[in-house]
Image (spheres, rainbow, N blue to C red):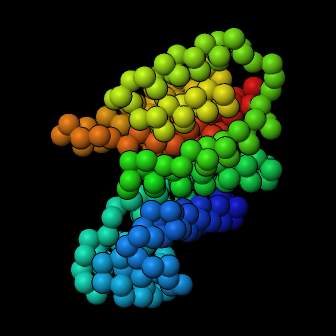
Amino acid sequence: MTKLLLLMVLGSCWASFCCTMTWRYLLDHKHYPHRRWSCCDHCGRRLTWWQLIPVWSFLLLHGHCKYCHTQIDYWWPLCELLMGILWGLAFTRPLPELVICGAVSSACLIISTQDHFDHRFQPIWLLLWPLILIFAHWPRHLLIDMCQVGLLTCGYYCSRIGHGDLDAMIMLTIVLGSFQSSLIILAACLLALADPPLYQHQPVPFIPFLSLAFLCYLAFPAFSFWLC
Ligand SMILES: [Zn+2]
């Protein structure tokens, strides 16, 4: 129980850190100079310690900055909450798997945050995903996997699919194989149906949904067959 709670708290704190660092150093550096302390992005006032507590600070502040009352983006509490739950679900895993899942989930958080705010991301973070191959069993159906990679590669000629989304789906196929990756892509598509911009004919960032489906797959003990 202690390990479960510790992982949940660690997961939400780590999500807060990853999202903030991504925002500060990879997305927002043009508008806000690097600051040592966490500040409100709108009024620049420094946040006090209790305003940094993942999830709870958002609830205590009713989703608004204490000083200028600007609405806080729901992205932060959502990532903190989901990552806390996902890390908690993985509590039965041995330490080496937890460390690798932590690295993979960090990469997912970084690219999801970039895609959410900027509709693009740096594919280099996808290079952390193959870490889970350490626990995969070989051989796999390499011919079928290669066919799926080939099909996905055709998507680069379609202007309506983001190239970064294709990078991620190809990497997922390489890491998990065609069957498991197809299930995750399908789950991500279903999750994306819940995104309101889809119904307003606006582009929908797919990476957050793909990452969520991927991390759920890794975190749920019932899905531990990913090792087989
Ligand atoms: Zn403010």
Does residue 57 lie above or below 219 as drawn?
A: below
Of 161 and 218, nearer the camera is 161
Is 63 left, or right, of 152 in this rendering? left
Residue drawn at (73%, 49%), measured in percent from left and top?
100
**Location of residue 191 (image quadrant):** top left
Is 28 left, or right, of 92 in this rendering? left
Does residue 26 lie above or below 136 as drawn?
A: below
**Location of residue 36 (image quadrant):** bottom right
Of 22 and 219, nearer the camera is 22
* Quadrant that contains the C terminus: top right
Residue 186 x/y as whole percent? 45, 26
Q: Hey, which residue is sitting farthest left in the picture?
A: 200
Tell me, yes or no, if residue 12 can be seen here. Answer: no
Residue 219 x/y as whole percent? 62, 44
Residue drawn at (50%, 82%), measured in percent from left and top?
35
Residue 172 x/y as whole percent? 60, 32
Total numbered badges shown on the rendered structure: 0
Of 19 and 26, nearer the camera is 26
Residue drawn at (24%, 41%), measured in percent from left and top?
202
Is 4 left, or right, of 194 in this rendering? right
Residue 69 x/y as whole percent? 24, 80
Residue drawn at (43%, 22%), measured in percent from left and top?
157
Does residue 204 lie above or below 140 as drawn?
A: below
* Quadrant that contains the N terminus: bottom right
**Location of residue 12 (image quadrant):** bottom right
Tell me, yes or no, if residue 168 can be seen here. Answer: yes
Does residue 225 lie above or below 116 as drawn?
A: above
